Amino acid sequence: MDNTGASPVYRGNLEKLITKIDVERGIDLGNYRRQYLERRLATRMRSVGVHSYRQYLDLLDREPTEYAALLDALTINVTDFYRDKTVFEIFRREIVPLMIESKMQTRHRMIRVWSAGCATGEEPYSITMSFMDALGERQKDFLLTVLGTDLDPGALAKARQATYAAEKLQSIPLEHQVRYLHMHGDTFSVRPEVARHVKFRQMNLFSERPISVVDVIFCRNVFIYFSREQQAEVLEHFWGALARGGFLVLGRSEKLAPSVSGKFELYNGRERIYRKPMSV
Ligand SMILES: C[S@@+](CC[C@H](N)C(=O)[O-])C[C@H]1O[C@@H](n2cnc3c(N)ncnc32)[C@H](O)[C@@H]1O
């Protein structure tokens, strides 16, 4: 590593690295605690045999696949139920009721959500429980479908099993645990009444689109895999797939590629929630 943590060269190159990841991938690591970031970076750099941020910057240029490995090392690659509490709070408190209200007014009774890059399924199940909770007795009047897609068939197989280790309960509100889950010792499973709303499909975000128009798209913590141009291409797909007034929820360190940002309205900047305008 370029000597002590305090040296200006060291600091300067760390800032360059953070800026590069933002410019190339649109991922803003600026909010991460510096100490945490430095520790994780050091581990990753050791395992690829580089000794300074300067060398690591060169490595990212030579081997862009290193971006995904780096973000794995920062544990962005983990997933969880209700991942990022504040995003799901806004989703449950504001977006779900808004969606249901507008469906009631227009007499459309289909609610369709797409969790793009759903990994092992925690996100689509969280979305489904949030809607079921808000619909309550009205569930029978609505057709709720949550589509989870991912490139990785192994992750999707786990998602379909809908069984998880008990440690994952921590992030699930108690009333949802009681209502929507079955406990079996040190594992739990999502009840069939919830799982029946969720469909999983293997899908590469570059080659296919969902068949129908969707009301909400979650695409969280996936963009690190893509260049800025690829992100713009995927965001164009999302724009096309969303219904007017539909919501797009990105990961907390992700943002819209500049070429498409004018097409979406900002709904909540802090939580990276966007909306397709009603008038398009
Ligand atoms: C970190 S996980 C995100 C899980 C969840 N969205 C969350 O935020 O907790 C990223 C997922 O994106 C998937 N992915 C990467 N590239 C993809 C692509 N081109 N098409 C579809 N999925 C992709 C990976 O397989 C991985 O499961």
Image (tube, grey):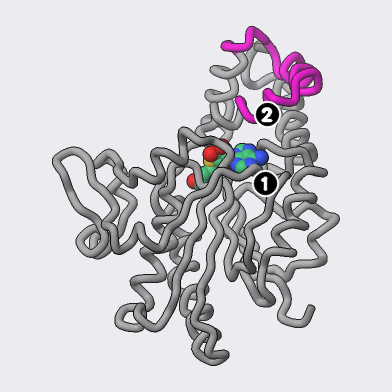
Magenta span: predominant SS is helix
Residue 61 vs 76, above or below: the answer is above
Q: Which mark is residue 102?
A: none
Give left or right: position of 189 versus 54.
Answer: left
Amino acid type assigned to the residue bearing label 1 in the image: Leu
For label 2, the residue is 67
Q: Toward the viewer: 118 or 247?
A: 118
Residue density around tag 1, few if under 14, some if 14–19, many if 20 or more, within 10 Å? many
- Ligand 1 neighbours mark 1 (CB distance < 8 Å): yes
**Magenta region, residue range:** 46-69
Q: Quadrant of the C terminus?
A: bottom right
The secondary element bearing badge 1 is classed as: loop
Query: Can the viewer see residue 10 in this picture?
Result: yes
For label 1, the residue is 205
- Residue 218, x across and y down, in percent: 57, 57
The answer to if 47 sits in the magenta stretch is yes
- Going 29% across and 63% down the picture, which residue do you hit? 193
Nearer mark to the viewer, of 1 and 2:
1
- Going 54% across and 84% down the picture, which residue do you hit? 108
